[in-house]
Amino acid sequence: MNKLLFPLGAALCALFVVTVSRCTSEVEPDSYAVLAPAAFAEEAEAWEGVVSSLQQRYDAVVLRFEESPMELEARLKEVAPRYVAVVDVPENIGRDYVIALNQMSRRMDEDPYADFLWGIITGYDAAGAQRMVDDAQEPMVLRTGVATIKELEAAKWFDAYAFVDDHQVGMRGEKKAGESSLTYSEIEYRTDMTGANERIRRFVEKRFGKDVPDVLRQFLEYYEGYEPDLVVTASHATENNLEMPGSVGNLRCRDGRLYTDYPGEQRFVEDRDSRMVYLPIGNCLIGNMNNTRNSMAAAWMNSQKAATFVGYVVTTWYGRNGWGGLKYLITNPGRYSVPEAFYMNQQDMMAQMQEWSDSLTVLPFDYDTNYFKTLTPVLERLAGDRGLTEDEAFFWLGFWHDRDVLAYYGDPKWNVRMQEVEGESDFTVTSEFKRLSRDEAAATGASRRCVITVETSPDFSLRRMQGDGFKEEHVLDLPFSYFFPQRLSNPVLPEGETRHIVLDENFLLLYDPAFEPGQTYTFEVLCD
């Protein structure tokens, strides 16, 4: 009997049918694979050291490719790892590379869900990639934060936190160590535009009048002062810059470092001494290494020690993949690691897309055409067949657009998570495995029964489990979700189960749970 205790959270009200999937082979419950080039053109010994470090840490199988990790699809099906690290040089990594990795992760069996958690291990150079591996060796709890978004202003997750607002430009807030809430104030204005070119001057005059809030300078004062564990940004960005606000203040990259580009002023951002997690989940393009080490992504990993970096490789729009991952991370904080949170969000997306149309789980999206204001021909046809309104069809379009375009850089098995918030661990789950009797095994074709028990406390809050309304314009209420401590073999729901459950080898989602305070709920899963 294997009994495990875990905190749980997250739920969504939606009408979904019961969905199950089966694994076609026996698999190791927690195996790890490293994918790497057959030969590294430069710094070969150092890059091989990165591969060796991961192999030794996880007793991982190492698979080699000539041109692309996607060559290894058949071998991955045979090995069936639960975690995959791709070690590669930045010159090989671009938009299509990330999209293909996302798609390959779902092709290990016939269901639409990702069968492994993956992360790309890379850096400005081999030393940077090795540092990413080393920094993920020990667990980390995220206790301090700095952001360019207002949405985390509750600040309850952090001992210290500060933000500049990318929407209401000029607002800032700060919660210093020992304080219980934010103090708000206005960002100082830049009055000296000496050195600004005519384009910037026109932008400032049109947007702000004579002067402009000195947003980037304030952000860097917070960032360099706190050296936070977590950074979240959502300002305008590309592969080569991060703007605050507009093009008046820019962070840019050079030689693996970040530097500020003000009108008439440039300086390097101070290099960090401590590891961190960077989630630019509201930024366009910043997750795209663009097949060069001279990218913002490489600079954040190199000089700022971003041991995990999660960002878009295309222009953002609907934002479900990025904002949804953050919502899973901060809902019932401490329950999911960063890689688990983004994984669970993506599977939630896939479950909803499969319910709408199987085709949306596999059809390629044309990222070279601007569909932000016009429906694709595919969705126009689907919307017509199902009688959808235009708003409903755009909802589908947003999921489809976001399906494959989030890059995860870092060790997919790193135990890095938010710290728990007092009073919010208001339910628990226990997982108990029992061997079936000979008659039960013959009748069901399974060998074990996994009984999952959820117990809610007297002060349990369903709304908090659902995400407490965080970023509802991008992510509606979340489903109750559970990432199995170990991957199950051939999981199925027992006959007679009528709840709206989505089940896979790695996770369970329950839609419309209607949990109440002080109650106990159970699920049964049959498996080998």
Image: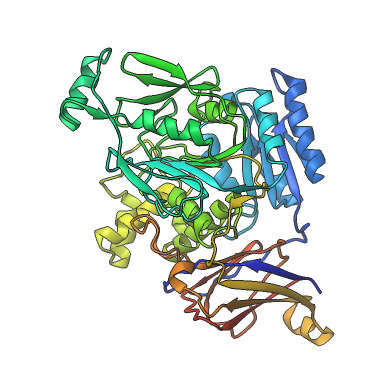
Whether residue 16 is visible: no
> Looking at this view, is 472 or 102 the one in front?
472
- In the image, residue 63 lies at what x, y percent? 75, 38
Q: Hey, which quadrant is residue 44 in on the image?
A: top right
- In the image, residue 106 lies at what x, y percent? 59, 52
Decide: is 126 above or below 342.
Answer: above
Whether residue 422 is visible: yes
Decide: is 365 above or below 356.
Answer: above
- In the image, residue 500 lies at what x, y percent? 50, 75
Decide: is 56 above or below 446.
Answer: above
Name the residue located 61 percent from the left edge and 53 percent from the top edge. Answer: 337
Which quadrant would the C terminus be assigned to in this image? Answer: bottom right
> Looking at this view, is 356 or 296 the one in front?
296
Tell me if 52 is positioned left or right of 325 in this view.
right
> Looking at this view, is 182 or 462 the one in front?
182
- Residue found at the very far front of the displayed protein: 178
